[in-house]
Image (tube, coloured by chain):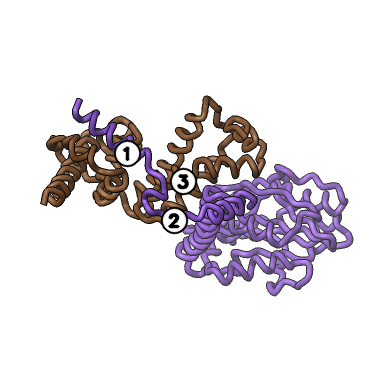
Amino acid sequence: MKNNLDCNIIREKLGSLDPLSVGVVFGKEQAWDKLQARLDKKPSLTPHGHRWAAVAAMLLLTVSVVGYFDCSNHSNHLAKANPRFDKPNVSINAARLLYRSAVPSPVTPQIRPKCTSADRSGRRGTSKSKISKKEQTFFASDIIPGRGVGARLPDSQVTVVVRLNSPAPATFPMQVIHVNELGNRPENNFVRAIASVADQSIDTRNLKVLHNNELNQQQFDIKELLRFNNRTLVHTLFSRPAAHDLNYYSDDDIQPGRILKSFFKNQ
Amino acid sequence: MTAQKAIEGCKRGDRISQKFIFDEYSEGMLIICLRYVKSLHDAEELMQNGFFQFFRSIDRFQFNGENSIGGWMKKIMVNECLMFLRKNVGLNICNDEIATGPMVNDGPLSRLGANEILQLVLALPVGYRTVFNLFVVEGYSHKEIAAMLNIAVGTSKSQLNKARAMLRQALEKKETFYEK
């Protein structure tokens, strides 16, 4: 009861206060002018808006940094797995592939003599040589008109660049077969694909190619063929053996950024 | 111009109506702000902020007599003051034990003027003063105060009792001074 009485007295007394009785000089007009100026001002970006913008910027930055380091880690991992396959060489090879049409390949075409079945069987036991990076990158330029292939490609203007990125060297001797020799095999469809491109009828999706080099002996599904205007085929088998997810690009799709992206992604 | 028409004008963004409302209520609102923040400069700033918020959110306001304007505006002002105290002063109210101090006698209080009571209230520490203002002057319950200040109900009660104890001491000093 007493408490209520105290409260009431204080409430009444404080409620009856006005600035003059307290001795406060209050510039009402000035305060109104300030308030009016604030009311006239259009509401700009709210503090919450600023916060969201900051959060979005941070998110973007984080994603870019993570993406950058992700790419770096992939390259480092590859370099660690095989010290001979270091990053600068990757870039050089990527650049080679990107500007393949403009710059001639520094790797000389590896044209090997015709192989008979007897030769192949003989070579099977002898090709335990050290594998260099050049050998990992397999270029076959200017397909020579020859048995099987030459009959189909009389102009010999189709260039095939085949790249196998397999960092792990083979632990056992394997048969080495040149890409030009693949046409001799009935199960090979890759050379048929070349021939179809030469005939300007491209149907290269889900074809199979058999590559036997000094590294491994594997079958790849071809889903990606880069075709340049000068009738050059660039087959980029950038993927690791486990990942055969390759895409097909037409002439218009050839962009260095996309190819590089594909390159690093698949690495 | 009546208050109702002024509110309708404010909803249309009419400057004259806004000026009318400002002239009517600005002094009272300034005193409310002054009870919380002491400094006249800060109180003016908070009063302007409160009016700005009031005019910005006037569409949500429903007119139920003249008292409703003052009540709504007072709430806005108190919120502005509490935000200011949290931000600048650091409204740290510790969770003390509930102290049941003696009540203030109504004798000396009734003899004191409004300005003297205000000075006594302003002399309280910020935590005590805030709870005292919210409970005694604005009429909030301890539960509401606890929610507003993010403290326990017991803490609110404790702060109020301590504020009263301090006021009593100050009143006793004043009594002794007057008796002498």
Indicate whether B50 appears above or below B135.
Answer: below
x%, y% of residue A43?
Answer: 61, 49
Q: Which residue is mark 1?
A: A13
| x then y, percent, for residue A71 | 54, 59
Query: Residue under circle 3?
Result: B27
Residues packed near mark 2 inside 10 Å, few (<14), some (14 to 19) or many (20 plus): few
Q: Position of residue B108 (x, y in %)?
A: 19, 40
Q: Is residue B136 left or right of residue A165?
A: left
Asked where in the image residue A159 lies, by quadrant, the reply is bottom right
Q: Mark 1 or 2 closer to N-term?
A: 1
- The amino acid on which the numbered mark 1 sits, given as a three-letter code, is Lys
In the displayed structure image, the side of residue A173 where residue A220 appears, left or right? right
Of the chain colours in the picture, the one used for chain A is purple
Q: Quick one: quadrant of the N terminus of chain A?
A: top left
Chain B drawn in what color? brown
Q: Name the secondary structure under disc 1.
A: helix
Q: Look at 40% across and 55% down and name the residue there.
A: B40
Q: Residue at x 25, y 44 (%)?
A: B128
Determine which residue is flagged by label 2: A25
* Chain letter for the residue marked with disc 3 in the picture: B
**Which residue is at a point 73% across and 52% down the rendered structure image?**
A225
Mark 1 and mark 2: Cα distance apart in space: 20 Å
